[in-house]
Amino acid sequence: MNDLFSLEGKVAVVTGGAGQLGGEIARGLAARGAEVASFDIAPTEEGDGVRGFQVDVTDRGAIEQATARLSRAPHVLVNAAALDSPPDAPAEEVGRFEDYPSESLDQVMQVNVKGTLLACQVIGARMAEAGRGSIVNVSSIYGMLSPVQELYDFRRAGGETFFKPVAYSVSKSALYNLTRYLATYWAKSGVRVNTLTLAGVWNDQPQEFLDAYTARMPLGRMADAQEVVGPVVFLASDASSYVTGANIVVDGGWSAW
Ligand SMILES: NC(=O)c1ccc[n+]([C@@H]2O[C@H](COP(=O)([O-])OP(=O)(O)OC[C@H]3O[C@@H](n4cnc5c(N)ncnc54)[C@H](O)[C@@H]3O)[C@@H](O)[C@H]2O)c1
């Protein structure tokens, strides 16, 4: 049964592997036996089985160069690189929808959508040539459902304007159909493509936000970063061999009511 989840002998690329969840995912895949490459603009914490490559995912050439340095065509690609605005984001990022800067939209779409698409283009193509592979596109509950703007009331208490910005939601929504498009496009080539939808992960957010968020959350708490590893191992491994084009929702029950 254990072998079903083994990643022994597999090569995995995790974009955003220097980040909170990307780092956890990279270490989690390595612990299951994968040789892991993190593609990130920031330096990755390297360790057992994890190697860092400085790659801007909006740059197709940079993805190609780093991929060419891997020992073999990747078996696994996890697209976790992204831009977001946390609950304590600076005021200029979190104004009214009517005033949302189009430059910010462009930046977020470049990384979250174009960056994911380019990584799929380059690495998915290698997978299809090799006749096997699993791609996991990391989305968010805020791409599946609207953000609950009331959770940020604490930011408005002193008269400040605060809205969770629209670009993140729009960009994360786009991943569902990128996933479905590629799942059918590469189905006969042995490449599976799925979305993993996550809700909020604990990362020392302001207490007022934590209180409001966890009150709305059926499980009554935010996710621990390590709790994203199991679903990624499932999607990356043979345990999910009949799963493609799907959306695996790991949200503590957020979308259940
Ligand atoms: N943390 C959460 O609560 C949460 C909830 C739902 C979904 N997610 C999703 O999980 C994924 C990981 O989130 P996280 O919380 O670890 O974020 P994070 O900000 O800690 O990590 C994101 C990483 O992406 C990298 N990055 C940004 N632009 C890049 C580029 N152009 N090229 C290469 N790398 C780039 C950053 O350097 C960073 O290391 C994201 O897709 C995010 O949307 C996170």
Image: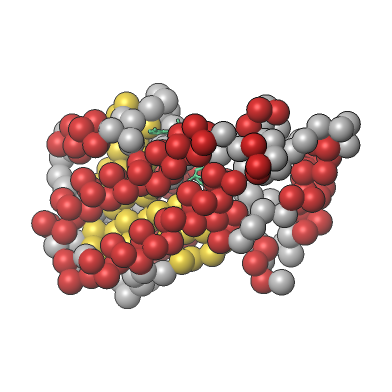
Is 152 placed left or right of 1 in the picture?
A: right
Which residue is at the front of the view, 248 or 57? 57
Q: Residue 78: horizontal and vertical position, in percent?
A: 37, 49
The outermost residue toward the left is 129
Q: Residue at x 32, y 75 (%)?
A: 242
Q: Residue 119: horizontal and vertical position, in percent?
A: 29, 45
Residue 182, compared with residue 68, is above or below; it is below
Q: Work out whether residue 47 can be spotted.
A: no
Q: Residue at x 35, y 44 (%)?
A: 114
Which of the 4 image quarters holds residue 221?
Answer: bottom right
Where's the C terminus, which quadrant? bottom right
Q: Work out whether residue 21 can be spotted.
A: yes
Is 101 placed left or right of 231 in the picture?
A: right
The outermost residue toward the bottom is 242
Residue 27, compared with residue 243, is above or below; it is above
Where's the N terminus, which quadrant? bottom left
Residue 19, compared with residue 179, is above or below; it is above
The outermost residue toward the top is 43
**Coloration of the structure image:** secondary structure
